[in-house]
Image (spheres, rainbow, N blue to C red):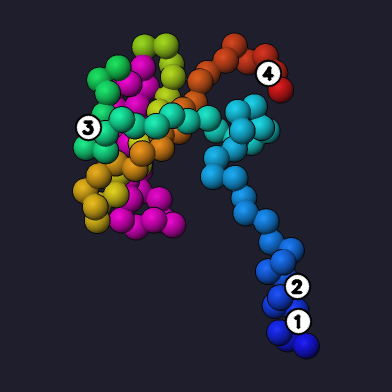
Amino acid sequence: MMAFGLVLSVAACERLPRAAEPGTPGSVPGESLATTNTLPAEWGRLVSVTHPEWASQTSLLWFEDDRGVVRVASYDHLSRRFRTWVSVVRRTDGASHE
């Protein structure tokens, strides 16, 4: 009976998308880094560095450019590289865009 439940639960699983589709409620768009050892100067100034509890070997670097666009780059201390996916938060005038 336990084996049947395991087979049934595996058959019911569906792989989640790697990234949310743009415009999906709750999703944060992003962009890919061309290299994992440098960050573009166009991102503006570094405004914060945080260390998430759920990833002790990771630092999140928060940048803001002149237009108010915020980018969050994830640095892995073990590999000494930035991860290739960067979250991008564009600010709006406050109107709903959903």
Q: Earlier in the sequence, mark 4 or mark 3?
A: 3
Which amino acid lies under the numbered mark 1 shown in the image of this protein? Phe
- Please tell me whether residue 83 is drawn above or below residue 56 in the rendered image: above
Marked residue nearer the N-terminal end (1 or 4): 1
Residue at mark 3 to residue at mark 2: CA–CA distance: 46 Å
Q: What is the distance, in whole Å, between disc 1 and disc 4 at their CAs?
A: 46 Å
Q: Residue at x 57, y 15 (%)?
A: 92
57 sits to left or right of 69: left
Q: Label 3, secondary structure: give it.
A: loop
User: Pointer 2: residues within 10 angstroms few (<14), some, or many (20+)?
Assistant: few
Check residue 97 in the rendering and tell me which mark sits there, or answer none: 4
Q: Which range is magenta?
A: 43-65
> Which of 17/53 is in front?
17
Q: Which residue is mark 3?
A: 38
Task: Classify mark 1: residues with Cα within 10 Å, few (<14), some (14-19) or many (20+).
Answer: few
Task: Name the residue beneath numbered marker 1.
Answer: 4
Image coordinates for residue 32, horizontal then vertical, percent = 39, 32
Check disc 4 and give the amino acid type. Answer: His
